[in-house]
Image (cartoon, grey):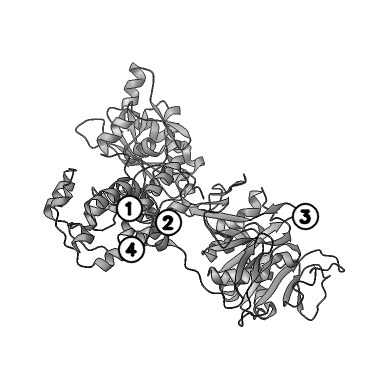
Amino acid sequence: MDRMCGGMTLGVDVMDRMCGGMTLGVETSLYILICLGIGSMITLHFFFQYRNPYELRLTPTPQLAESLEKQETIDISSIKANVTNISNIRRQIFDLAVYLKKARLHARGSKTQRALKYASENMDAILRGFGTSFEAVTRRKLYKSSSMCPEYYVDKVYGHLIKNCSYSKRLEEIVTIIRLNYDSPADKEFTRDGYGSKIPVIIGDYSGNVKEKSNIVVKKMASTITEGEALNMLMENVKTTYTLVLRNVTELDWNARIERLVREIEILNVNAIGGSIRNSDNVWSLGCHQRVYRNYTVVFEEGYDESMHDCAFCDHMDGPFLIKTKTLKKIKFDSKLSPMGLYEDFFMRLNTESAVCADSLFDMDFPRRSKVTKEWESFGRKRNLYRLKFSFGLTINFGCDYGYPCQRKKGFVRSPCCIQELADLSYGFMDMCEKEGGSCQLNAGTILGAVKMYDVIPWEADADLNFRCQDFNKLKEGGLKLGSKGIRVGVERISVCSPSAHPAQLGARSKHWHADIWSRDWIEPYEVRAEHRNLTRIPFNGRLLNGMRNPGLFARNMYPEIFLHQQHASEGGVKKVYKFSKCPMKDNHDCIDNYYEDGNIQFHDPVA
């Protein structure tokens, strides 16, 4: 155990600061490598997003804790080991390697990619001490197909051939096709080359042109039935293990290679698998997208991070897909959604990896993605979205002209529309103050947000403003003019302009927010205006508002460590620890613990 633990006793608090919450004992040299490679840079960026499910219960020695408190360099050779469960440490390291693999695959920024590359290399050195390797620990598990005989590669001429086996099933025994027909002529033959002619097919027919056959069941659809509702009706009649959803397919031939999809859905153990697509202009597309849903924004980026067996793993697929029937019937389609967002919503609720195999090809019309916000509105409102983005250039901004929720609950960030309302409240009063010839400035947490975010802090509880007390009456009267903007200004405390008296206080309210507006017998912008005629104006939610002459100095004096993030005292209490509280809903898109306790770029639009 001395060889495994390198003479160290490490605790949760210690390693959270030194090695990102990873508890381990290794030779001194390896310990230094992991602390340098995974330590201060990696774990603050990564570990709080991919939390280790195993609780660490190791206690630091007083010597080690004292050194860390003083931020001193630690002589680890003098630290004695006190590790009671080496198998648990091994499990934690193995799990951490898996999280590193996920982070490395999905990293976009060059700094993050480089740091994770070094961390993975250091982790590989540690794992070799356990008789394994980084790739061995993080390799995906493959399963044996129970329905299709295995493939084997021959050469460049013959490609892949199929081995003989005794357990292969016929497609018609395990697959049912469902599709919708809108305007096909009555004499059009859907299948080509006889491929798939025996597979059971259930068609939702809007045109009235499709005729039933021995393997084809036709369900007549009225024009009022939505696409999602029609698909749900069809799937209820499926009896086979798998369902092939032929989305917008114009014809089906042997290039679909449905046998291949069945084989890979079982080998890769995914819930859904699809193929590439070719449109009516013979343009080919893989149709594989990665998705990020964070902070009221959904981003789809076409491409892949990982592949296996010549299939790319995807969060969303554009083309037809084979899916486990029991999963399809459980998830279903949302019958209330329009075609814009119907499949995006389906795969979001599926919420598991899917795959696209490039050699399976379907002829279909590429999915139409409208540029009209109205057509996406039912999807956007369901997800409470502020913005929807696709990597090919389409961006849908839903705006705030609707009854958006503005819940201020512990453990969540506020919605962009909720933040916009608070910013509008602050701007409305400040603009009125300027027009009335008063002297006002941002204060407290509001100026802090302007300094660190150029905006409202995403977990803000109210707005804070100041005004010169001599302007009390004119601002009280001027506030009456803000009613048309949905802002109500009232007197909350009356006093005289005297350093010894309680300051006068105004209050401003909007639908969901309140602003505390305190009087001061001296307001810097007024003096600056008189002496220098150059007020400091600071960007705030896309506009410029008055701050003090040196906003950064004011914020730093009021809030030590101004760039680190800390929840409002009404939520997190008064504490010195910069750590977000645990979210009541695990992995929800608006959970505050999705974010790191430092940095503002993470609050910009996400990258898939």
* Label 4 close to label 2 by CB (< 8 Å): no
Q: Nearer the viewer, residue 22 or 489?
A: 22
Dot placed on the residue nearer the N-terminal end, 4 or 1: 4
Q: Name the foreground residue: 332 vs 213.
A: 213
Q: CA distance from mark 4 to mark 1?
A: 37 Å
Q: Quadrant of residue 456?
A: top left
Q: Quadrant of residue 2?
A: bottom left
Nearer-N-terminus badge (2/1)? 2
The Cα atoms of the two marked residues, 4 and 2, are separated by 19 Å
Element type at marker 4? loop
Q: Amino acid at mark 1?
A: Phe
Q: Residues within 10 Å of mark 1 (few under 14, many from 20)?
A: many
Q: Which mark is drawn over residue 101?
A: 2
Residue marked by disc 1: 580
Left/right of residue 230 with respect to residue 298 in the rendered view: right
**Residue 40 visible at all:** yes
- Residue type highlighted by circle 2: Lys
Q: Work out whether mark 4 precedes mark 2 in sequence or the reverse, and give the earlier one.
A: 2
What residue sits right under mark 3 in the picture?
280
Q: Which residue is mark 4?
A: 131
Residue found farthest to the right: 187
In the rendered structure, are the residues bearing label 2 and label 3 in contact, judged by CB atoms less than 8 Å apart? no
Which amino acid does the dot numbered 4 rest on? Gly
Q: Which SS class for mark 3?
A: loop
How far is mark 2 from mark 1, CA to CA?
25 Å
Q: How many residues crowd around disc 3 within 10 Å: few (fewer than 14), some, or many (20 or more)?
A: few
Indicate the position of residue 454 as horizontal and vertical percent values: 42, 37
